[in-house]
Image (cartoon, rainbow, N blue to C red):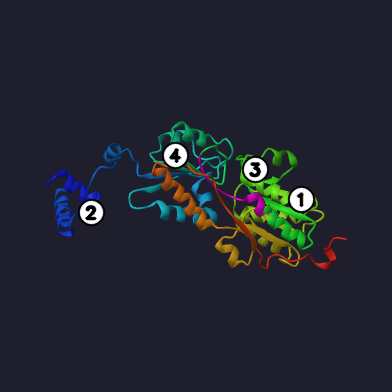
Amino acid sequence: MSRATVSNAYNRPDQLSERLRAKIMSAAERLGYAGPDPVARSLATQRAGAVAVMLDRGLSAAFSDPALSIMLDTLASTVDTGERSLVLMPGGAQGGGPRPSAVAAVHADVVVAYSLQTNAPAITAVLHRNLPLVVVDQPHVEAVATVRVDDRHGARMAARHVVDLCHRDVGILSLELAADGYTGPVGPQRMSAAQFQVTADRLAGYRDELPVPPFVWEAPDSRREYGRAGAEWLLRQDPRPTALLCMSDELALGAIRAAGDLGLAVPQDVTVVGFDDTPAAAWADLTTVRQDLTEKGRQVGDLVLRLLAGQGPGDPVTIGVTLVPRTSSAPPSPIRLPR
């Protein structure tokens, strides 16, 4: 029996009859042969059979974010044909992506960068290796495949929604502005030095539409406990905000909990608006800005397959956004209406 026939039994089973393949696999089992060495195969084919996904933070924080989980699930189903798999590369405790040394050593055919900060060293390490790259959300990198969301427009729609409801005093629960782990109130200097483009764009979109400068609280990542802590601070300010604009649904769900802690009802005492439209948002009847997370993952997967086929990156892909009004938003109570 030829070497090619044995190779086909493992790598191209459709080329053999069922009977012949069963005979080969039975003989391999008797001999204790587990199949072709994947390292040797990658040397022969010049393919790693893997797509590396660089995350902006550790796995526990990353997988608490349902928006990321939905996108990753669709990406995996798009690129996993049985010949390749995803390799997850977590970032450090304070975000910023994986270490450049890890990027230099990763065995992958294409790298996907998910929501890293501007000038992230991990991006530089990928470019130094000349690996094909797909950037999701941020940062902006010239001449690479990109999938992004119309974040500024989405934030403008959310802010316009609360303004149209006659809210004047508004608080913002912001995603991280820099990968330094900071959480707390934010002033103009920190906002102007933002290292995350998505956060900067959403802040700009909110501020485009709001009639007075808002109170801003920064969370180090998208988790409900940060939304709860930030909303508690915002709702103790004077004048107390009658609406909270949150940069993720998870932050918004935490804000709803904080309102209840303070004896405030949503939406009678405070309107809450999220961003993403995850399944939890629909469950909580949360007004939010919808980005199609499944379509986002599919578009990322299609770009990965395009690069694997040796094609160019093509034009950047922009995922559209829509406002989804639900019962967490309403006009302020009459005693709080602006004069």
Q: Is residue 151 magenta?
A: yes
Q: Which comes before the other along the chain, label 3 or label 2?
A: 2
In the picture shown, does residue 187 fall above or below 72?
above
**What is the distance, in whole Å, between disc 4 and disc 2 at their CAs?**
30 Å
Q: Which comes before the other along the chain, label 4 or label 3?
A: 4
Task: Answer left or right for 67 relative to 175.
Answer: left
List the residue tagged with mark 3. Answer: 177
**Percent position (x, y) of residue 287?**
66, 63
Residue closest to the far left: 1
Find residue 13 and name its label: 2
For image coordinates 68% across by 68% down, the residue present is 327
| Closer to us: 204 or 237 | 204
Q: Amino acid at mark 2?
A: Pro
**What is the distance, in whole Å, between disc 1 and disc 3 at their CAs?**
16 Å
Q: Which residues are magenta?
A: 144-154
Question: Badge 1 local density, few (<14 within 10 Å), some, or many (20+)?
Answer: some
Q: Which comes before the other along the chain, label 1 or label 2?
A: 2
Asked whether the residues under the numbered discs 4 and 1 touch, taking CB atoms below 8 Å apart as contact, a structural biologist would say no
For image coordinates 77% across by 53% down, the residue present is 210
Q: Amino acid at mark 3?
A: Leu
**Percent position (x, y) of residue 155?**
67, 53
Nearest to viewer (mark 1 / mark 2): 2
List the residue tagged with mark 4. Answer: 132
| Closer to us: 49 or 321 | 321
For image coordinates 55% across by 58% down, the residue present is 292
**Percent position (x, y) of residue 223?**
59, 53
**What is the distance, in whole Å, between disc 3 and disc 2 at their CAs?**
51 Å
Find residue 214 and name its label: 1
How many callouts does the rendering have?
4
Nearest to viewer (mark 3 / mark 2): 2
